[in-house]
Amino acid sequence: MSFGRPPTFENFKVSPPQRGSFPLDHEGECRQFMKVYLDCLKSHSQESANCRLLNKEYLECRMSRGLMERAEWKKLGLPDDPASNTGDGGTGGKS
């Protein structure tokens, strides 16, 4: 027993994230896409189904700039066909 001292962490192993690590957007390359997407979520009571196309645009920005590994849309829960997206066509509710 260890009274008053921290336990040892000899068996503690750090595991990487499932999808790997990715750099943060320190340069703000995709900030505008992120802001439009978050504004859409806010205006739709955090209901992401209404903002799926905006989510796709944001993720495409990150993938095209090397801020995340390129993945199939299907694996990210997004359809390949823009016509099958729900929501407002990527306008964020703006006309």
Image: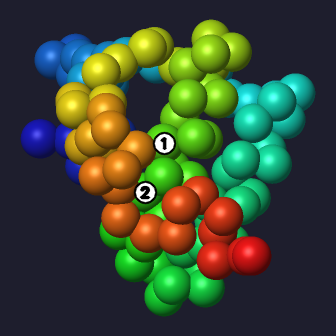
Instruction: Determine the secondary structure under disc 1.
Output: helix
Residue shown at the point (87%, 27%) measured from the top left: 27
Residue 36 lies, in percent from the top left, at 71, 61
Instruction: Determine the secondary structure under disc 2.
Output: helix
Q: Establish if 45 lies above or below 60.
A: below
Instruction: Please state if 58 lies on the left or on the right of 84 as rendered.
Output: right
Few, some or many residues within 10 Å of mark 1 (<14, 14–19, 20+): many
Q: Which residue is mark 1?
A: 56
Instruction: Please state if 2 lies on the left or on the right of 34 as rendered.
Output: left
Visible in this render: residue 1? Answer: yes
Q: 46 or 82: nearer the eye?
A: 82
Residue 45 lies, in percent from the top left, at 48, 88
Instruction: Please state if 45 lies on the left or on the right of 26 as rendered.
Output: left
Residue shown at the point (35%, 18%) measured from the top left: 71
Residue shown at the point (22%, 32%) measured from the top left: 74
User: Looking at the picture, which amino acid does disc 2 mark?
Assistant: Arg
Q: Which residue is mark 2?
A: 52
